[in-house]
Image (cartoon, helix red, strand yellow):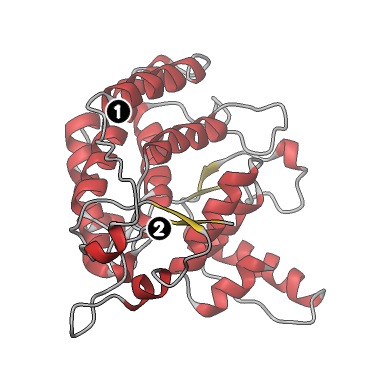
């Protein structure tokens, strides 16, 4: 039997410097253990040599070309799928990819995982997933589940707001406390000025959230839905109340939703890729309230 243990050095040291989970693993003598971990720091701890002496160790440093490769791939994806949009929108391809790379680098460097934040792990694939998701929303797909009509996204301001929404859903929704969220909003404010020439205070992302969704036409066929900005919050609340009342009338258990939670449910429901849907559900379950977790799993 082979057991794989990820984040081997995440267990917290007790009063005497021991790690009980590691000591338990040391007792397994009749099987092969394969493990992975990052260098100590950011919540990771040194592992006792009494355990490491049983392993053949390989150190794999981060590639210096990772970020440049991500930029090239992201630019290729974004530029290709914006070809049918107005010129003002197409001109934002560099800004979208450049801002995405910088957000990814700063989030993965400054907000490191700890035992209380073990899901604060950002892989390079997250950067590509963001652009894949972003493009899925912008460009009509064969399934036509999520699409933003080029007649809706017409200028740089609109594509910037869509970018903000996607960046918040990919990065901000992972965060579990106000300090980390405020730090992310500060990054977004800096990216807005640096890459999009938009002057937006960090606090505005809290007081006036940017939300997009495809559920504003109640009862519409999936192929007729348009992914658009939810600018009229009063109308959104009223529509979500109608959706919720309709669901509760046909369900034995009552469910309650917030606006942001309703948007996340829509994104989860419309994910066509199995692994992406699983990752998205896992992240939502980590940071949501107990009531919202129950409604997501339903």
Residue in view at x 17 percent, y 42 percent: 190
For the point 34% across and 67% down, the residue is 176
219 left or right of 174 in image: right
Label 2 sits on a secondary structure element that is: helix
Q: Position of residue 15 (x, y in %)?
A: 19, 85
Residue 20: name its quadrant: bottom left
Q: Nearer the viewer, residue 179 or 23?
A: 23
100 sits to left or right of 140 = left
Count of marks placed on residues: 2
Disc 1 versus disc 2: nearer the observer: 1
Q: Earlier in the sequence, mark 1 or mark 2?
A: 1
Asked if one can make out residue 70 in the rendered structure from this viewpoint, the answer is yes
Q: Label 1: which residue? A: 66
Q: Dot 2, how many residues are within 10 Å of its Cα: few (below 14), some (14-19), or many (20+)?
A: some
Q: Quadrant of residue 182?
A: bottom left
Q: Position of residue 189 (x, y in %)?
A: 21, 46
* Residue located 43% across and 73% down the image: 27
Asked if residue 97 is positioned above or below residue 188 in the image, the reply reads: above
């Amino acid at each position: 039997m082979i057991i794989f243990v990820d984040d081997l050095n995440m267990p917290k040291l007790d009063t005497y410097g021991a790690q009980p989970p590691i000591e338990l693993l040391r007792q397994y003598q009749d099987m092969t253990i394969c493990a992975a971990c990052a260098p100590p720091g950011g919540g990771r701890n040194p592992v006792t040599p009494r355990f490491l002496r049983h392993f053949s160790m390989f150190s794999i440093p981060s590639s210096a070309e990772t970020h440049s490769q991500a930029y090239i791939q992201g630019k290729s994806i974004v530029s290709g799928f914006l070809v049918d949009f107005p010129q003002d929108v197409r001109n934002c391809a560099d800004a979208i990819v450049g801002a995405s790379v910088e957000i990814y680098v700063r989030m993965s460097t400054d907000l490191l995982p700890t035992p209380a934040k073990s899901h604060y792990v950002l892989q390079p694939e997250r950067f590509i997933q963001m652009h894949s998701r972003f493009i899925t929303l912008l460009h009509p797909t064969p399934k036509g589940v999520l699409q933003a009509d080029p007649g809706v996204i017409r200028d740089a301001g609109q594509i910037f707001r869509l970018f903000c929404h996607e960046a918040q859903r990919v990065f901000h929704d992972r965060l579990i406390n106000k300090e980390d969220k405020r730090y992310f909003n500060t990054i977004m404010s800096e990216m807005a000025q640096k890459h999009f020439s938009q002057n937006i205070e960090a606090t505005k992302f809290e007081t006036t959230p940017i939300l997009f969704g495809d559920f504003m036409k109640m009862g519409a066929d999936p192929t007729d839905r348009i992914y658009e900005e939810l600018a009229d919050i009063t109308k959104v609340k009223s529509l979500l109340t109608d959706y919720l009342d309709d669901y509760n009338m046909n369900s034995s258990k009552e469910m309650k939703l917030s606006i942001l939670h309703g948007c996340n449910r829509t994104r989860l429901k419309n994910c066509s890729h199995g692994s992406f849907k699983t990752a998205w559900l896992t992240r939502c379950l980590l940071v949501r309230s107990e009531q919202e977790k129950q409604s997501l799993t339903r």
